[in-house]
């Protein structure tokens, strides 16, 4: 390696790398801000304009776009040597470049004519060229990789073809994401959602199989549930990831101590409590048969008491913010039990594939506007129970009906074509009396029949979005039965 080109926006670690390259006898070419930083650090460099004999121009838009730069990067050793010599093009063996931060600058609400100046041209051209010619040129775009380069240079270890291909792959992934971000932004101008939509996920890991053994699957992600690996237990499955995501998404509805149990992507137990053990036991008792073999998520540290209770039965996975050391020791006796640490939520657009395309949706922050529509207001306990019931209902497959008291769900009816059938299933699932309970519906009641079924089971209050052409009939039936009813104005279908 005789010559390196360094031109970076992110200056982290560049001085140390440049010094190591210089001490190894490698000639350094640099430009703009990078050249100033390296010169200030006393590291000899040659300016790009001096190297090419062509001045930087157009406010820095044109500086590295020159045959001596791109010929030096793209020239195939042993193939293009004669033309390189004829044109006085020296080979460039190492390209260290990272790009203008377009993605970050879009968050600053800049005018378009200012933002487009952060669309990098020279940087992408150089790293694409180097990645294309990876067999002869090493390309590094991530400061976290600088130590690898420095170690190889200091120990005089050559980079293998596999090493070079690794770095080239990172270039094309970065370029795909970078161009996708620019495309999404420009296609989204004056629109809520871009007409052309690009997305990229990292850290792909093969799973044993998909929803069923005959299906091939992988998981992608570096943060949140997508990036989670179990602290112990078997490898996570496709269905495990879906269920953990469902459990944690519901759990995040609660600020107070809470536990959620999910089975087949639907909650089958939800409860709050004074302590994490009490919350878990209460959640499990909502539907103990379904809870067996389910996914448990709690929002408090797992302590010894909870660990003993979890270890006494069979669950697939336990997710929590943390685990005490003694709890870990107890749970280690359940060798197949997967333990996952819940991290901060990561907001991303929701994407689902369909035949020939995809669906994408964005869920903005919103606030329900509760409105009492009956003659009777809910009591304080009923209002607390309605709040809990609606939190659960939002995360149940439609049609969804949830009975609850102020501390836990009592009966959950999910995924039925008829809302009345969902109510009947919720009632049949209930392990405790429903007298004095409340009911939540994820969508409006088109007829009074669901309310009638709920009232006959013992419910005294109901919460729903409202908006049916028969709202007056439903309200009249609630008043007839002395039920309190609240409209929220927000539907929570979950398909």
Image (cartoon, grey):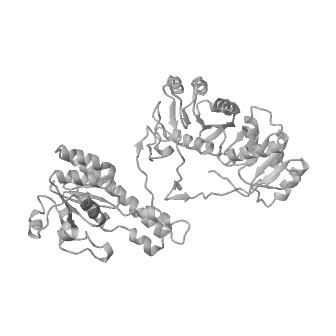
Count of numbered labels shown in the rendering:
0
On the rendered structure, is 401 left or right of 136?
right
Look at the picture and state if 98 lies above or below 113. Answer: above
Q: Does the rendering let one see residue 272?
A: yes
Residue nearer the viewer, 267 or 425: 267
Residue nearer the viewer, 278 or 238: 278
Quadrant of res 379: top right
Residue drawn at the location 75% of the way across and 52% of the way down: 464
Residue drawn at the location 57% of the way across and 58% of the way down: 362
Look at the picture and state if 161 lies above or below 468. Answer: above
Report the residue that reaches farthest toward the bottom.
58
On the rendered structure, is 165 left or right of 368?
left
Task: Give the image location of residue 180, x and y in percent.
Answer: 42, 62
On the rendered structure, is 455 left or right of 81?
right
Q: Does the rendering let one see residue 162?
A: no
Look at the picture and state if 132 lies above or below 119. Answer: above
Residue drawn at the location 71% of the way across and 50% of the way down: 442
Task: Give the image location of residue 185, x and y in percent.
Answer: 47, 67
On the rendered structure, is 460 left or right of 8?
right
Residue nearer the viewer, 280 or 412: 280
Task: Give the image location of residue 158, x and y in percent.
Answer: 17, 46
Look at the picture and state if 58 lies above or below 327. Answer: below
Task: Give the image location of residue 280, x and y in percent.
Answer: 65, 32
Quadrant of res 76: bottom left
């Amino acid at each position: 390696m005789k010559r390196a080109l360094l031109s970076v926006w992110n200056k982290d670690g560049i001085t140390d790398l440049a010094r190591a390259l210089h001490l190894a006898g490698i000639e350094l070419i640099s430009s703009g801000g990078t050249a100033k930083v390296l010169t200030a650090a006393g590291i000899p460099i040659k300016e790009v304009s001096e190297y090419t004999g062509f001045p930087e121009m157009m406010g820095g838009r044109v500086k590295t776009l020159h045959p001596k730069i791109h010929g030096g990067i793209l020239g195939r050793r042993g193939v293009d040597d004669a033309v390189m010599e004829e044109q006085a093009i020296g080979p460039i063996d190492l390209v260290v470049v990272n790009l203008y931060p377009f993605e970050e600058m879009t968050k600053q609400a800049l005018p378009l004519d200012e933002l487009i100046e952060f669309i990098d041209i020279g940087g992408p051209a150089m790293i694409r060229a180097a990645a294309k010619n990876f067999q002869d040129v090493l390309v590094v775009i991530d400061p976290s990789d600088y130590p690898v380069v420095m170690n190889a240079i200091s120990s005089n270890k050559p980079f293998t073809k596999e090493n070079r291909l690794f770095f080239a792959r990172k270039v094309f992934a970065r370029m795909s994401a970078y161009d996708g971000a620019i495309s999404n932004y420009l296609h989204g101008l004056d629109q809520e959602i871009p007409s052309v939509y690009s997305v990229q996920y990292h850290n792909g890991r093969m799973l044993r199989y998909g929803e069923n053994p005959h299906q091939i699957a992988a998981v992608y992600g570096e943060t949140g549930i997508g990036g989670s690996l179990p602290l112990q237990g078997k490898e996570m499955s496709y269905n495990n990831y879906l269920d953990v995501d469902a459990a944690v998404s519901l759990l995040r509805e609660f600020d107070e101590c809470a536990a959620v149990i999910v089975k087949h992507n639907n909650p089958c137990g939800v409860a709050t409590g004074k302590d994490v053990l009490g919350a878990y036991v209460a959640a499990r008792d909502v539907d103990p048969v379904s809870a067996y073999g389910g996914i448990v998520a709690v929002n408090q540290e797992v302590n010894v008491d909870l660990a003993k209770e979890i270890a006494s039965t069979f669950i697939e996975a336990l997710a929590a913010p943390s685990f005490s050391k003694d709890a870990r020791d107890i749970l280690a006796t359940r060798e197949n039990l997967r333990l996952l640490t819940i991290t901060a939520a990561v907001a991303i657009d929701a994407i689902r594939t369909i035949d020939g395309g995809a669906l994408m949706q964005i869920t903005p922050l919103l606030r329900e506007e509760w409105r009492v529509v009956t003659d009777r207001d809910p009591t304080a306990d009923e209002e607390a129970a309605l709040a809990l019931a609606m939190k659960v209902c939002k995360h149940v497959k439609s049609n969804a009906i949830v009975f609850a008291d102020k501390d836990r769900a009592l009966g959950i009816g999910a995924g039925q074509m008829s809302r009345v059938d969902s109510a009947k299933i919720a009632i049949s699932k209930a392990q405790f009396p429903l007298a004095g309970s409340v009911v939540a519906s994820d969508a409006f009641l088109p007829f009074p029949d669901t309310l009638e079924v709920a009232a006959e089971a013992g419910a005294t209050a109901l919460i729903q979005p409202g908006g049916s052409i028969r709202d007056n009939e439903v309200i009249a039936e609630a008043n007839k039965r002395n039920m309190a009813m609240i409209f929220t104005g927000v539907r929570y279908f979950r398909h």
